[in-house]
């Protein structure tokens, strides 16, 4: 807009609202309480400068500043997971239950994380969470929570075998993602790997021959995201009993009890019952909780891990403890619901969506994801749209992440809460305009 001569009464730059007046506006004040003063002040000053530059009228400063603010104080963007992959690592793995979210909110302030309110004395950290885990897995004498599954494995091998040997099958020398490999993790603990067997076949005699005075533990690793088929042989945990050293079984995805849908996926209860001395696993995969690593098993060994200096560096905070306890004790998790989603219900929802926005309803197999249950297909249905819509859907509000397959954008509803169907419809309608 054209400016009046500098200094004249009509010069809009003379009428730039004062910063304190703008910050006192109720909507701006509310934004300050939500996003912080510095972020809001930057937006206000940018709007004031536009008035001085003649690009904005003075009475538009508040609305312009508010419009330029981010929707939340974090750069992380909520996403509708329409990929059909239940445990999607790039989308934060497990979606937390409402009970876990409520527990995090309750723990956000001051809580008795290391205080016995009855005596006023210090207490064991996370005692409620470990009690919940032990109730869920009575086969375990004790439990310990650390900050992720890899940390659980590293702590176990460090405490049991630093400076000694860890005996492991060559067929279980896995890479767990993003380039992190089991040999490198074990080497970082100060332990030495003693590989036994071959890539495709390992026998109990291989383990028995390798175990000696310098053995710290035997390590069994579930291969998780790959399968070896054909001329193969592996040794069950039950066969490793009696070799004179602790048996540590890393089961990966964090099932506490067997799930008939995933018959080949190991669970903590069965693995301990079979003879493992310690089980390590993740909390944010099939367990459906926050990022965490679990160690379950013999009481003396868990205590040995708990007292190791490394445990202090790997411990979890109050928010994780609260969310994990609520996950274990609470209602069915989103992960469990998505895994066991009814294909007929998914088809009805997809057909309703197709009637509203167009597209074709097609069969779509979901996946467990997160390295769990490779090869297990989860039958379902999806809405097929042009592949060109995938990018604008990711950039929308809400952001929708779909699967692009055979030149189609597949909107799979398995991991989209039914309550979010109206949001999904609006997001698709927005990119079709």
Image (tube, helix red, strand yellow):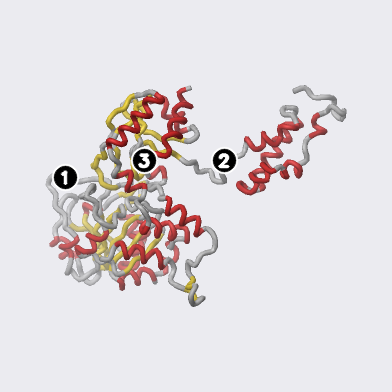
Q: Residues within 10 Å of mark 3 (few under 14, many from 20)?
A: many
User: Is 215 in front, or is 301?
Assistant: 301
Q: Picture coordinates of residue 206 (x, y %)? A: 15, 60
Q: Is residue 395 above or below residue 149?
A: above
Q: Is residue 376 left or right of residue 62?
A: left
Secondary structure found at label 2: loop
Residue, far right: 8
Query: How far apart are the alpha carbons under marks 3 and 1?
Result: 30 Å
Q: Is residue 374 above or below residue 133?
A: above
User: Is 32 in front, or is 390?
Assistant: 32
Q: Which residue is mark 3?
A: 415
Tag on residue 71?
Answer: 2
Q: Which residue is mark 1?
A: 229
The answer to whether any part of residue 163 appears in the image is no
Q: Is residue 263 left or right of residue 191?
A: left
Kindly identify the residue that appears in the image at 26 percent across and 37 percent down: 379
Q: Which-is-in-front pick, marks 3 and 1?
A: 3
């Amino acid at each position: 807009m054209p400016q009046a001569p500098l200094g004249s009464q009509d010069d809009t730059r003379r009428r730039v609202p004062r910063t304190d007046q703008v910050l006192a506006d109720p909507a701006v004040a509310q934004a300050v309480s939500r996003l912080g003063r510095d972020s809001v002040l930057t937006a206000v000053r940018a709007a004031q400068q536009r008035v001085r530059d003649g690009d904005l009228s003075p009475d538009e400063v508040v609305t312009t500043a508010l419009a330029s603010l981010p929707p939340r104080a974090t750069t992380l963007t909520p996403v509708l997971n329409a990929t059909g992959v239940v445990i999607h690592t790039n989308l934060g793995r497990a979606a937390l239950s409402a009970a876990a979210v409520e527990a995090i909110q309750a723990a956000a302030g001051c809580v008795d994380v290391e205080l016995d309110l009855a005596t006023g004395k210090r207490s064991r950290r996370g005692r409620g969470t470990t009690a919940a885990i032990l109730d869920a897995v009575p086969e375990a004498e004790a439990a310990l929570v650390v900050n992720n599954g890899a940390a659980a494995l590293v702590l176990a091998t460090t405490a049991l075998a630093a400076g000694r040997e860890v005996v492991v099958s060559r067929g279980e020398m896995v890479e767990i993602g993003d380039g992190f490999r089991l040999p490198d993790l074990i080497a970082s603990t100060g332990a030495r790997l003693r590989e036994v067997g071959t890539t495709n076949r390992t026998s109990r005699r291989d383990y028995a021959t390798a175990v000696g005075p310098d053995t710290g533990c035997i390590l069994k690793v579930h291969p998780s995201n790959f399968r070896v088929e054909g001329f193969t042989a592996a040794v069950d945990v039950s066969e490793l009993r009696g070799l004179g050293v602790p048996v540590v079984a890393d089961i990966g995805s964090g099932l506490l009890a067997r799930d008939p849908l995933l018959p080949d996926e190991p669970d903590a209860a069965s693995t301990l019952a079979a003879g493992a001395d310690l089980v390590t696993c993740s909390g944010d995969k099939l367990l459906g909780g926050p990022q965490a690593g679990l160690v379950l098993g013999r009481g003396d060994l868990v205590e040995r891990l708990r007292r190791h200096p490394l445990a202090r560096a790997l411990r979890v905070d109050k928010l994780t403890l609260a969310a994990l306890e609520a996950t274990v004790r609470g209602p069915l998790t989103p992960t469990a619901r998505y895994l066991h989603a009814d294909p007929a219900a998914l088809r009805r929802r997809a057909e309703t969506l197709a009637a509203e926005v167009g597209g074709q309803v097609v069969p779509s197999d979901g996946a467990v994801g997160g390295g769990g249950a490779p090869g297990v297909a989860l039958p379902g249905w999806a809405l097929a749209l042009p592949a060109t819509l995938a990018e604008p859907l990711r950039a929308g509000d809400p952001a929708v992440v779909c699967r692009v397959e055979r030149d189609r954008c597949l909107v799979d509803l398995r991991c989209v809460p039914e309550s979010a169907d109206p949001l999904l419809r609006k997001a698709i309608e927005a990119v079709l305009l």
